[in-house]
Image (spheres, rainbow, N blue to C red):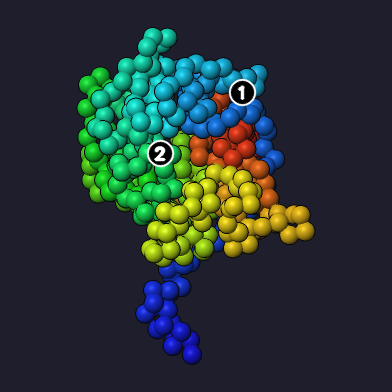
Amino acid sequence: MTALLSAMASLFGRDDDALSVPPMDGVFKPNNRLETAELILELPAIDNLAIAGGALYCSSGDALVGVDPTSRSAKPVRRFDGQITMLAGSQSGRIAVGVEGAGLALLEGIGEPRWLDLPADWRSCVTAGLFRDEDSLALAIGSRRRRWSDWKRDLMSHGASGVVATGRVSTGAFEVVGDNLAFPYGLAARGGGELIVSESWRHRVLSVPADGGAPKAVLDQLPAYPAGIAAASDGGFWLALFAPRRQLTEFVLQEDDYRDEMMETIPPDAWIGPDFADGGGEEQPLQAGSVRQMGIMKPWAPSRSYGLVVRLDRDAAPTASFHSRADGRMHGVASVIEFNGRLYAASRGAEALLGLGLDPDGSR
């Protein structure tokens, strides 16, 4: 009987591997460490943490904002004509700013930004940046076909047009070192000239040689969609994962006709799939169990959003994790950074900046 069912599943493309989702177990065992983290401040659409010239910055929609975690204050620095999709800072204080639809701006001091001449199909979805020195900049372009704000359509269309590139801000010239990537979302440096890249739609972390050699997976089969990645003081990395993988989403990603009709007939907020937050509106899908029972959201419910930060060692192996579960509020963490001996995480779902200690349990 088992053999017959297996043969039928294989015939119709429904084998177990096709819909399997890695469990949150072992290092990924759920906890409430993000939910109980220190709330530094609340800021609309907070994202894209970066350090430049020894100061902490973040984005808030179209605004670049300076943050002082000690006084728990935020001060707008500059606004742009579009949503900020990426920040990268150098030791001297240079800040590279990705702006949806406009491309890449370079800020030096208080003067007007200098815009780098990126290819036209890079300008709407710059997802990550990394200063390797004062002139060398690595970039991740999530998609060359769609804008950053259309990331759900890129996922549902099996998008794999992303690139990783390295270049110099003095000349504005960039060279592609990784191509045909499924939404590269985070960048960090590793010794030997390698770049560590989070590839969101394929649920993995890659090592990409800066000279353009073939990318290699160093961590795969993640239980959630990876986003920003940042260097840790111990030589490892911090990885943000903005939403959980679910079997229902995996199923929909296989059903072309259903998915095409879904994208054509209903708004993106009501699509079956991941999100930075669960708005709880009546038009949203049930997500195979993500509903309130007797007025209570169960922490183990298969929700469309989640909060997750993972600590990786030098070899990109996970060693600890920090969660905000289905019934929590600190969801949609897409950016993390280590600053002055603490870890900071930006929750898009809660519009909050969180502070944690660097110990495996997040203690101060």
Mark 2 neighbour density, 10 Å: few (under 14) some (14–19) many (20 or more): many
Foreground residue among 36 and 113? 113
Residue 69 - label: 1
Residue 74 sits in quarter: top right
Q: SS of the residue at dot 1?
A: loop
Q: What residue is shown at x 51% (from left), y 32% (from top)?
A: 47
Tag 1: amino acid: Pro
Q: What residue is shown at x 28% (from left), y 23% (from top)?
A: 116
The quarter of the image holding the C terminus is top right
Mark 1 vs mark 2: give the one in front.
2
Residue lying farthest to the right in this orientation: 294
Tag 2: amino acid: Trp
Residue that badge 2 annotates: 148
In the rendered structure, which disc, 1 or 2, sits on the residue that comes first in sequence? 1
Foreground residue among 114 and 199? 114
Q: Residue 223 in the image: x percent, y percent?
A: 51, 56
- Work out how far the residue at label 1 is from the one at label 2, CA to CA, in angstroms: 28 Å
Q: Residue 42 in the image: x percent, y percent?
A: 63, 29
Residue 263 sits in quarter: bottom left
From this view, report whether residue 237 is shown above or below residue 299.
above
Report whether 307 appears left or right of 316: right
